[in-house]
Amino acid sequence: MRSEQKLRDLAHTDSLTALSNRFHLRQALNKAIEQNGPIALLCIDLDRFKAVNDNYGHSVGDSILRVIAQRLRSCVDQQALIARMGGDEFAILLWSQAAVKKVDELAHNVVDTLCEPIMISERQFRVGASVGYTVSSGSHPSLDDLLIQADIAMYAAKESGRGRWVAYSPQLGEVSRRRLSIENGLRSAIDNNEISLHWQPKVDLQTWQVVGVEALMRWHHPELGHIGPIEFIPIAEQCGMIDKLGRWALSEACRAGTNELAGLTIAVNVSASQLQLFDYVHSLEEALQQSGMAPDKLELELTESVLIDDADKALAILNEIRSTGVRLALDDFGTGYSSLSYLRRFPFDTLKIDRSFVTELLTKDDAKSIVKMITDLAKELGKHTVCEGVETVEQLDLICTAGCHQIQGNLIAEPCPLNEFSRTINPDLKPLQREI
Ligand code: C2E
Ligand code: MG
Ligand code: MG
């Protein structure tokens, strides 16, 4: 009898953490559903476990998971079942009236407790967690529906910035269905020719010539219609599709750069996660070679997020890219950490001042001085400046006074398909012509 009990315990237990396993959680959830009482189910996913596991090895990863298990135990009382669902995903099931009532408090507590630093072999780790939960009282949905609901809420928590907790609601279901369609659609979008590049000119303020052009990705989804890069790029990053999309954009941009757009500097946006792939520089060199594109005619636009996680590693990759002759631009400057020390330390050739400053130029006094200060400093460091999102001649005039090198924006031209792209710009817009 004792060995039978032992066998059952083993079958119900996660061997690493001694918590319940997925199988046991499903059993307990089934039982709770049959009993028709209230149920709360929390789904907990660690935010930065994968990076720790990849960089410091599985034994550190395992130790962290054990600490997490201990902390989860400290968050709940006896009337709960805590399970490790696999990998870095955990769940908590509550079925007593009192516990279910306090589920939001528990979710909050779990997030706070798991974001505390963890010491392993004198090293400090901060993994953090996102929590989603669903509550059901009386006529319950099926076991799988409850698990899906908690999962949907957890993804919403992750998307809202990590280290958060979110309760399930049917509206979240809508959002997650759209997300799922996008994720699935992305897998075949390139092969189905649904992705294209649009092009927006960059104008030199001294010569009033189009000197460069930025490639911006566009997607026409067969059912959902036009989906903007602001929506699909972050999803592509999360579901591992950004590499394929990025390679396609780079090779298409290089192809156009040696044909229809020859002579212009071609700018391509690159996500931080693309640089994490170990052979990024190799694939860059391959694209240059295959197209015959001159490296100094290609500029990669990166945002500050690339510098935040591991600045030393980023610096090494950026230097490697720079040594191929390809230029680097810091995109959306002013929206992230905006540290001026980045400019000194990292090998950027160009600084793109974010549209938000340009928009505020006429309404906020300090926007003017900020643009002037950034431009002056960039000049001192030998970097080019581009003002993004210029929409009016009034903005253009202020930018000229600040001494910016180039502008880009709907005032000159909106992004358009290659066959509509023009190198001529409206001469009436030229600032000197208008005697500012
Ligand atoms: P970004 O690189 O900062 O691109 C500039 C964005 O501002 C573009 O939005 C452009 O259409 C928009 N824009 C340009 N001029 C104006 C203006 O005068 N007024 C206004 N209101 N907007 C203007 P878009 O095309 O929606 O792209 C959004 C972002 O998506 C890009 O911001 C970039 O971060 C990302 N993205 C686009 N294509 C790619 C790509 O191929 N790869 C990667 N990784 N990201 C991309
Ligand atoms: Mg850009
Ligand atoms: Mg930008």
Image: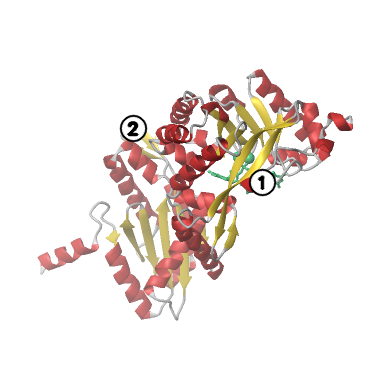
Residue at image point 70% right, 46% down: 414
In this rendered view, identify the residue nearer to me: 191 or 390. 191
**In the image, is the residue at mark 1 within 8 Å of ligand 1 by its beta carbon?**
yes
Residue 270 seen anywhere in this rendered image of the structure: no
Mark with earlier residue (2, 1): 2
Q: Position of residue 384 (x, y in %)?
A: 65, 26
Task: Check disc 2 and give the amino acid type.
Answer: Glu
Q: Position of residue 244 (x, y in %)?
A: 44, 47
Q: Nearer the viewer, mark 2 or mark 1?
A: 1
Q: Quadrant of the C terminus?
A: top right
In this rendered view, identify the residue nearer to me: 231 or 28. 231
Q: Position of residue 29 (x, y in %)?
A: 35, 71
Instruction: Point out which mark residue 415 bears.
Output: 1
Position above or below: 101 against 433: below
Q: Quadrant of the N terminus?
A: bottom left
Q: Position of residue 92 (x, y in %)?
A: 38, 62
Dot 1 alpha-carbon crowd within 10 angstroms: few under 14, some 14 to 19, many 20 or more: many
Instruction: Identify the secondary structure beneath mark 2.
Output: loop
Residue at image point 40% right, 33% down: 282
Position above or below: 20 against 286: below
Position above or below: 19 against 302: below
Instruction: Identify the secondary structure beneath mark 1.
Output: loop
Dot 2 alpha-carbon crowd within 10 angstroms: few under 14, some 14 to 19, many 20 or more: few
Q: Do tag 2 and tag 1 residues touch (Cβ < 8 Å)?
A: no
Task: Check disc 1 and give the amino acid type.
Answer: Pro
- Which quadrant does ligand 2 occupy? top right
Residue at image point 67% right, 18% down: 380
The quarter holding residue 72 reads bottom left
Residue wearing tag 2:
122
